[in-house]
Amino acid sequence: MNDKESLMLMFSFIIYLASPVSTTTVTIRNDIPRLDGNGRIVDAHSGNVVYHAKSKTFFLYGERYGNATGMDYQWVQPGPNQAPKLGVYTSSDLIHWEDRGLCLTPSDETNWIPMVFFDDKTDKFIAWWAGWGVGVSQDGIHFQRLGEAKSRLTGWRVAGPHILIDDDRTGYIIFDATAPNHPLKKSHIVSIEKLTSDYTNSTKENVTGFFPDYFVEAPTLFKRNGIYYATYGTCCCACREGSGLVVFQAKNISGPWIRQPKPYSNVNCRNKNVSVCRGRGLYPSKPTINNPTIPAQGYSITAIPKKPTADGEVEMQYLWMANRWLQGSGNNGTCTNLCDKSAPEACTTQGQPEYRVGRDPTYWALLDFDDDGNVLPLVWQDSFEIELPF
């Protein structure tokens, strides 16, 4: 190879390194409901999205209500016909969803608030749901129940499981818990425990103690650029107003956990001076308090990878997912939450013949961060773009 050929080869190599990787983006819409391939509203609530890199497939898990009315909600009328069950959809682009049916065989136990993740050590999907039921699946669609995990808080009611697998492969679960015979106004407090190495049970090792707020639920746990984030919102019980989004940060999973400074301490609230932003929740007779910015209750923050760069680096996008409770078609506004047992007829086929809980829309948004790593306040978006991993 002569000098001219060597220079040409070097020049071509430099151009290759400098050339950006072509990416594909799609537009996620919030101004219309998400639909499946048959034109039906996607009936997946309070769950999460999992990206499976080997098959380049997104799995969407969530509570499925089907034809249920408000009277079938678990807190209103528990029993063998109660809703919800757990369902799954798949997609190649986060836009076109295929209904894959129920991912768990229906049972009399409560199947709600699912959290699913892929364990690349075993090539299996692992699911947790409220009450700490645990299941496992080879294909991400058909799950086998493994039993019930146990917290260190013996006798407490535990719910809202959200799981983080850390960089060293250690698993952690964040959850809300209610003590036996605990006064309602002092219940629903958030904590973190360490998982066993197979991620199917808790070691009962306390990581954080309790976060300072009470009457909160739907916690999430994620990590970005070496910073741990924990979020939660006020108890809502399927309320139309939604709930806020409290954000804590820590440089170590064991803390100290620091509440984001105002005006970022609650990023889904019009009132920037409150720590916990509340909708009506269990108090329909009272006026709306604090006024959440997005009328939705968050339930998941999922890391979605972007396409790898030329040198193999992968940047994550953090997708906030929330329920727009009781905002589906057919609700005339008289049904304001699903825990108001004083007027249950407002949420039934007698009160609203056309309304079904499964038609409630969801709201998705990518979180934005400032240069210091703070989560920025949410603003309503009719649509936004997200980059696909391939």
Image (cartoon, rainbow, N blue to C red):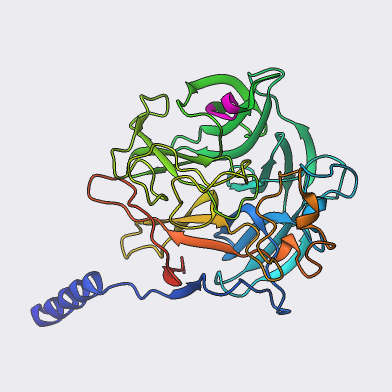
**Percent position of residue 371, x then y:** 22, 49
Q: Tell me how many marks there are.
A: 0
Between 184 and 212, the residue placed more toward the observer is 184
Give left or right: position of 138 versus 11. right
Is 206 one of the magenta-colored residues?
no
Q: Quadrant of residue 317?
A: bottom left
Q: Which residues are magenta?
A: 185-192
Between 93 and 169, the residue placed more toward the observer is 93
Q: Is residue 221 visible?
A: yes
For the point 68% across and 22% down, which residue is it? Answer: 156
> In the picture, which quadrant includes the N terminus?
bottom left
For the point 63% across and 27% down, which residue is it? Answer: 184
Between 129 and 40, the residue placed more toward the observer is 40
For the point 76% across and 42% down, which residue is it? Answer: 75
**Percent position of residue 195, x then y:** 59, 29
Give left or right: position of 383 versus 6. right
Q: Quadrant of residue 368?
A: bottom left
Whether 367 is drawn above or below 387: the answer is: above
**Percent position of residue 164, x then y:** 51, 39
Q: Is residue 196 visible?
A: no
Whether 64 is drawn above or below 246: the answer is: below
Give left or right: position of 196 versus 30. right
Of all residues, the one furthest to the right in this rendering is 80
**Percent position of residue 91, x then y:** 62, 69
Give left or right: position of 313 versus 140. left
